[in-house]
Each structure stands twice: as C-alpha cells, then as structure tokens.
Image: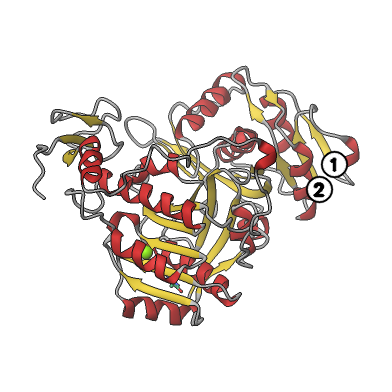
Amino acid sequence: MKNKITTKTNFVCQSCGFESPKWLGKCPSCGGWNTFVEERARADLRTSARAKGKGARDKGGASVKAVTLAEIDLDRQPRMMTGISEFDSCLGGGILPGSLILLGGDPGIGKSTLALQVMERIADSGKTVLYVSGEESLEQIKLRAQRLGAGSENLLLASLTDLDDILELTNKASPALLVVDSIQTMYWPQLESAPGSVGQVRECGAMLMRHSKEQAVATLLVGHVTKEGVIAGPRTLEHMVDTVLYMEGERHHSFRILRSVKNRFGSTNEIGVFEMRESGLAEVANPSEVFLSERNREVPGSAVVCALEGTRPVLVEIQALVSPTAFGTPQRNTTGLNHRRLSLLLAVLERRAGLSLGMQDVFVNIAGGLKIEEPAIDLGVAVAIASAFRNRPADPRAVFIGEVGLGGEIRSVSQTDRRVAEARKLGFTRVVCPAKGIERGSLGGMEPSTVSTISQALERAIV
Ligand code: TYD
Ligand code: MG
C-alpha cells in the first residue's frame, strides 16, 4: 500500500540524541560539532507502523488494568548464576530472567569474550542461550570459542544484523539468555537510517526491551563506547535498560574492571576484576593483592590507599612523580584520577602545607589501571606527592584514608572500618586517618595514627 503520509524527518545528534527539525552545526545539548544526521521522525514511524497494522494495540479491550500489590505474584524464576562470581556479584547475584543488560566498553577491551564465557557457563547448566553477532562471522566466533574452551550444545550462534530476523529466531529458539553483539551493528529495516545511528540504536533497543519483558528472555546488549567514555548513540539506552555494566581497563594492562553503573536489581558501583589471559578472562578473587604486587616499598612517591568500589574495599597504590619544570607551564598529568581533584590537592599542599609546587611537573598514577573517583583517596594522593617532592619514602606499612578539605583539614570518610579491615588482611600495620569514624575495637592490632590537618599527616607519614 502506498501511504499518503509524507515522510517526516528529524535531525538527530549522534552523540547525545538531541532532535531538531533543522540541521545544526553545533548541538545545543552536548556541544558536539557536526553531529547531526537526518533520520526519519519517530512520530511518523509510529503512524505508518499503525497504518500497516504493526504495533497497533487494541485499545478498546480489557487488557489495560491496574493491580494491587497483593495481587502481584512474586513466585518468579530464580536468578541465573554463571558461576563466574566476579560477574554474578557485579549484577547483584546473577542474571534476572527478563532483564535487559547493557555491556559497554572500548572496542577490543573484552566484551565479546566475557559475553561468550558467561553464555558457556549458562549453557553448561542446561539452559539454551543464543549469541547473535553482527560483527563476526560464525567461523570467527568458533575460533574464539575454541580459545575459551567453549563448546556446549546449548550454545546457539547466529550471524545476523536484521532485527526482525533476530526476533523471529529468538521466538523460535526461546533461549534463557540472548546476547546481541553489538547493538550498533543491528538495524530495523523500517527505519531508513544507517545501523549505529542514534535512531536505529534507540529503536532496536526499545524493541529488544519489549521482547525481553514479554518473553522473559534475559538480554545482554553489547555496546561500544566512544573516546569520551559515552556509549556512542546508545546513551539513550542507558535509561531504558535495567542494568548498565562498563568494562574498563588500560589496553596495555591485562586487568579489566567490570563496573555496574546502574542496576535496578542490585547495588551500583559494584566491581568485578578480571585478568585477560590467553584463554580468556580469568577472575581475580583478591584484587588488593594483585594491585599491590608490584609495589616497591622504598621508592619516594608511593602511598597505599583503600577505595571502596561498591561494597568492596580495594587497596591500590598511588604513585607520584614530581620534577622541576624544564620550560614554560608546569605539566599536571594523571592516570586513573580526576584531573581537577589533582589541581585542588596541589593547591592545598601549596597553601596549607607550604610545599612550593608551582614550578614542578606533577604526575600521578593509580597503579594497575583502576579509575577512582572517591575523595577518600585524597590523603594518600597528597602524601604520595609530598613524598615525591621531598624525595623521601612514605611509611610502607601504612594505609592512608581520608578526604582533604580546602582548609587543609582531613575529613572522615564512609565505612572506615571496612577499609581498615581490608588493610589488616593484607598485612598493613598502621592506618593514617582522621579520628572520626574509626572504632578502636575494629583495629585489631593495627596502630592508628589519627590526623586532623594535612601538615600533621605529612609529618607523620613521611619517614
Ligand atoms: P574482544 O572480546 O573481541 O573485545 P570487544 O568485544 O570488547 O571488542 O577482545 C579482544 C581482545 O582480547 C583482543 O585484543 C584479544 C584479546 N583476547 C585475549 O587476550 N585472550 C582471549 O582468550 C581472547 C578471546 C581475546
Ligand atoms: Mg566484540
């Protein structure tokens, strides 16, 4: 049927999803340049889909009704455990049937590898799983599977990119878990824009969500992230899905951190730590031990802190290097740490502790490739910088816990006890932290060094 409706189009920003009836050079929402692409308007799509009888709902029926809490049956299927405990705990205890999970990360970080490993475990437990790849051929997937030692009969594979085919196949195979790798390669033919555009990603995501809820199929969508750390296009998906997992890590390090940034069925900011090996991703059960394994205790500029990642305390080493600026403006470089936070700490060290860092280059790294936002590591960062500046090592037996305020005061942080307990487990004998928040009973033989200002802390920490 030739419909009379003229096709309406919109211009959509490909980095944030902002829509405009006109083409714009600069996106007013995210500030991106040259990001607008013409796409068919969504309202237009809906009318034409309804005209074709697709997606139209019978509004006159009694299917729409509200229920009371008591009427809701909680007797749901149990969560699917993969047995990869770093992954399970990141999700808050396995995959919930019917949930939609977005797994994001840079290309080549290990998303497909993790997805395949998770699927193999679930397939091993007797459930059917379906892996749809739009990026690799079946042969390539087989090669990867062989490397990972996967070969379950319940693991079904397909190399497809048309969403209608995927939904049809899923209805036929009715898997317990569907993996779509990646959402940027999928397209819905009704929409005229190219795969990977915001319109396609959003529409495919919405259709897969509807499908996963209706059929109670757990669905894992793999998405690539842009350099800026935003899932390209699929940013709009973040609101839609139940869980967002990010895979982080430096390409040149073997550690991979899986982080839950959104979870409707568990706590967020949980992390799982993996190591990329020849045979796939291996779990790292005790990350603190690994992150500290290469530490050189005697070198100036090193301090150990305890960050809380979700509910998990992790010890990491902060490394700092301070050297006189050769020419021009001093450099400030960070890896794993917020740049602004470093500037703030440098200013506090300068003004409240009398360190003249104005003509010094300062480099700060979090060893092992972890990214930490928490202000609880402030004290450790400040101590590492001061130790590097004075060229004297910080106490290697000590862990530093505390936030640094603008007045040079050391502030207490949440859950000091859990952090102290982790430090004790790893053989640290001294904790430098503010007096508030620490309970004597929880120290268990550790020597507390309570400090209230930054200069006091430097005095006690640097030997
Ligand atoms: P991959 O899962 O393809 O990344 P993504 O899907 O996120 O793009 O991982 C690719 C990298 O992982 C590649 O550089 C090779 C490495 N790798 C291993 O080191 N060991 C393995 O067993 C596998 C399968 C991959
Ligand atoms: Mg991949």
Question: Dot 1, how many residues are within 10 Å of its Cα: few (below 14), some (14-19), or many (20+)?
Answer: some
Residue type highlighted by circle 1? Glu
Instruction: Kindly give the residue lying farthest to the top in the view shown.
Output: 407
**Residue 144, percent from left and from top:** 41, 77
> Image quadrant of residue 156?
bottom left
Question: Does 404 appear above or below 13?
Answer: above
> Image quadrant of residue 333?
top left
- Label for residue 271? none
Residue at disc 1, secondary structure: strand
- Label for residue 429? 2
With 359 as the anchor, is 282 left or right in this view? right
Question: Does 237 appear above or below 22?
Answer: below
User: As rendered, which of 314 and 123 lies closer to the eye?
Assistant: 123
Count the labels in the image: 2
Q: Is mark 1 within 8 Å of ligand 1?
A: no
With 130 as the anchor, is 403 left or right in this view? right
Task: Please give the name of the residue rendered at 24% of the width and 45% of the height, measured from the top-left corner.
Answer: 49
Question: Does 449 appear above or below 170?
Answer: above
Residue at disc 2, secondary structure: loop
Task: Please give the name of the residue rendered at 68% of the width and 32% of the height, measured from the top-left corner.
Answer: 402
Q: Is mark 2 within 8 Å of ligand 1?
A: no
Q: Looking at the image, do the residues carrying marks 2 and 1 touch, with CB atoms under 8 Å apart?
A: yes
Residue 366, visible in the rendered structure: no
**Residue 299, percent from left and from top:** 61, 50
Residue type highlighted by circle 2? Thr
User: As rendered, which of 445 and 256 lies closer to the eye?
Assistant: 256
Q: CA distance from mark 2 to mark 1?
A: 6 Å
> Image quadrant of residue 179?
bottom left
Task: Please give the name of the residue rendered at 61% of the width and 20% of the height, measured from the top-left corner.
Answer: 352
- Label for residue 447? 1
